[in-house]
Image (tube, rainbow, N blue to C red):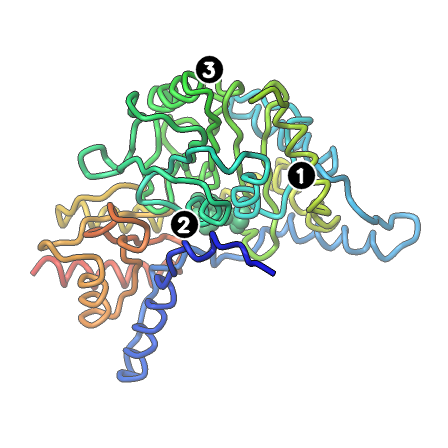
Amino acid sequence: MKINKNYDNLVPNYLFAEIAKRVNDYQAAHPEKDIIRLGIGDVTLPLAPVVIDAMKKGADDLGKKETFKGYPDYEGYAFVREAISDYYKSFGAEVSSDEILISDGAKSDCGNIGDIFGSDNVVLVTDPVYPVYVDSNIMSGRSIIYANCTKENNFKAMPDENVHADIIYLCSPNNPTGSAYTKEELKRWVDYAIKNDAVILYDSAYEAFISEDLPRSIYLIEDAKKCAIEFCSLSKTAGFTGTRCGYTVVPKELERDGHNIYKLWYRRQATKFNGVSWPVQCAAAAVFSEEGQKQIKENLEYYKENARIIASALDELGIYYTGGKNSPYIWLECPNGMDSWEFFDYLLNEINVVGTPGSGFGKNGEGFFRLTSFGDRDKTIEAVERIKKLLAK
Ligand code: PLP
């Protein structure tokens, strides 16, 4: 019996365990201190009432013979896919309901999509990076190359014509840096992918946070349907982190190596995934109703205002950052040349504020730090006041 030896190549990810350890040790030594956590990537506001009503109705349906539902369709119920297709239309993207597949979240699909690609493909990820892209490809034995995101390019890597890649992960607005590509920038990636016969795996989990005139889907870019798969999620859009629902778009016309990609992905899902439950799909459809859109906007505005409060403090302090405007994440340069963990300890010890050290997301994250806007408003304001007092000194 042999295990998959590729797992030996995974780098242990101590980031969140190490944060928890340092915070717990500090709290144990200083039980009276009020620690504010701006490191979390999870949402904190409850689901919208219209979503809860739909979920309850869905649960009631399961309790009656006439409305009972068994296994769902592999690609998700048509009414949910149609609602998502209309949602795409609302911001100008043409995505038909039969190109959409409902999933239990973007993490699973981003991680599983590699099943349909050969292990000898070269994978390009941006650095800093959402670790799922890297680890899932290491597990499959693929070689990974990195495109550097730095202060010089405002944490937006652009394609290098001298480098070949077969699979390209892009995340915009980005976790962890909050940077978001413009249409022109994405067009360069689309052109590069087509030239290289590559596929772009586009993670738009944070599209709902876009406020400026920036693309909310890669399908707003000409020719993207010839080269891109898009992953999206209701986790941050509508607070579904614990409820679990997302969707993946695979254009029907997307072909590689003599194969239709939609058909391959459908086959993969039909083999290894049995769909999302009826109450959750009912809840998901409610998100895209007129009332649902109104109600989820209230939560999104709450988080966006938190982000604005954090960003304006950094503006006042003259600290360089990306994100905050079109993203729940604020990615800042650690002041006074501190490295990421030094700054983490400094904030924890001096003002009892917790963030996420940027070095945990890749080598280009060293010297940077991530704050999130998913916390409570009053606590965010209090944390920002503490940061201003500390760093204005
Ligand atoms: N993609 C990115 C970039 C994320 O940051 C996250 C969650 O943190 C996900 C995907 C996961 O989304 P889901 O909860 O739908 O699995």
Q: How many labels does the image show?
A: 3
> Going by the picture, which residue comes out furthest to the left?
393
**Element at label 3:** loop
Q: Is residue 187 above or below residue 336?
A: above
Tell me the distance, in whole angstroms, between the alpha carbons under discs 1 and 3.
28 Å
Is the residue at mark 3 in contact range of ligand 1, meaning its CB lies under 8 Å from it? no
Q: Which of marks 2 and 1 is in front?
A: 1
Q: Which residue in the structure is indicated by mark 3?
A: 222
Point out residue 118 in the picture as x, y percentages from the top left corner: 54, 34
Which mark is on residue 131? Answer: 2
C-alpha separation, residue under disc 2 versus residue under disc 1: 23 Å
- Work out whether residue 238 can be spotted: no
> Does residue 165 appear to the left or right of 383 in the view shown?
right
Q: Could you classify mark 2 by the number of other residues whose Cα lies within 10 Å: few (under 14), some (14-19), or many (20 or more)?
A: some
The residue lying at 30 percent from left, 35 percent from top is 147
User: What is the three-letter code of the residue carrying label 3?
Assistant: Glu
Mark 3 or mark 2: whose residue is earlier in sequence: 2
- The answer to whether any part of residue 297 appears in the image is yes
| Residue nearest the observer in this picture, 324 or 177 | 177
Q: Earlier in the sequence, mark 1 or mark 3?
A: 3
In the depicted view, which residue is nearer to us: 194 or 172? 194
Q: Which residue in the protein does label 1 denote?
A: 268
Please tell me which residue lies in front, 78 or 136.
136
